[in-house]
Image (tube, rainbow, N blue to C red):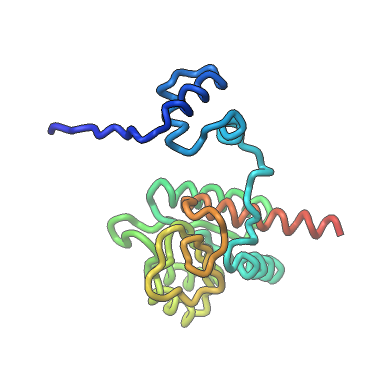
Amino acid sequence: MNKRWALKDNTNHDDVIKLAAQLNIDTVLSAMLVQRGITTFEDARYFFRPDHRHLHDPFLMKDMEKAILRIEQAMAAGEKIMIYGDYDVDGTTAVALTYSFFKKLYTNIEYYIPDRYKEGYGISTQGIDYAAEHGITLIIALDCGIKSVDKIDYANEKGIDFIICDHHLPGTSIPAAVAVLDPKREDCEYPYKELSGCGIGFKLIQAYAEKIISQLKK
């Protein structure tokens, strides 16, 4: 199969030469950086040396307060929580990150990865039925759920609450979950819109950790 590469060539040559000299790097790498809007030494330092102080406030994300409050309520009441995520790389890393964090703080918790062939992508009826059969009353869904309106309605009928952490484009309506975290929601003011599903899980963890720290300082 023949492929034709189309090289992007709309960079400012002067910026490329200047940045290459400042960073002592090859102009090929410098051009790649300039194409990404990195044109100064400070821009490059910000890009190559990330710092936790650069993170956006997680509570800028729509429904984050609701999500943290529901998790706190579940833990205080001893409810059983399930971390649910897709079987792909983004979903499994999101589950691994989120589950490993909350497992250290709360033991009445488990995770669930849907069967690729029997359940497919996203929230499944089988997964909700499993939760109902095992006394789970709160599901934190990662990398999926933003279009699962009917599945969330089904869960609500069974007395199971959902916190959705997704990064895909919403449909015509938002599911009736306790909280729906998705920067691509039109009503979400979180400034960075391209987080992965695992990234949304990280923001949930960040918000919860910040809440704990603020309570300890009081």
Q: How many marks?
A: 0
Tell me: residue 146, above or below residue 173. Answer: above
In the picture as drawn, the residue positioned furthest to the bottom comes out as 157
Check the image and report above or below for 38 versus 75: above
* Identity of the residue drawn at 35% across and 57% down: 115
Quadrant placement of the C terminus: bottom right
- Residue at the farthest front position: 14
* In the image, residue 162 above or below residue 7: below
In the rendered image, residue 196, in percent from the top left (x then y), is placed at 47, 50
Give the x, y percent position of residue 43.
Answer: 58, 34
Task: State which quarter of the image contains the N terminus.
Answer: top left
Depth check: give the residue in front, 30 or 177: 30
* Residue 166: % across, % down: 47, 60
- Taking the spot 48% from the left edge, 38% from the top edge, the residue there is 37
Which residue is drawn at the image coordinates 66% and 57% (left, top)? 207
Front residue of 87/203: it is 203
190 on left or right of 141: right
**Which is nearer the eye, 126 or 84?**
84
The vertical placement of 54 against 44, above or below, is below
Judged from this view, the residue extending furthest toward the left is 1
Describe residue 43's horizontal placement relative to residue 158 as left or right. right
Image quadrant of residue 129?
Answer: bottom left
Q: Residue at 68% across / 66% down in the picture?
A: 72
x and y, in percent, of residue 128 in the image: 43, 70
Does the image show residue 112? Answer: no
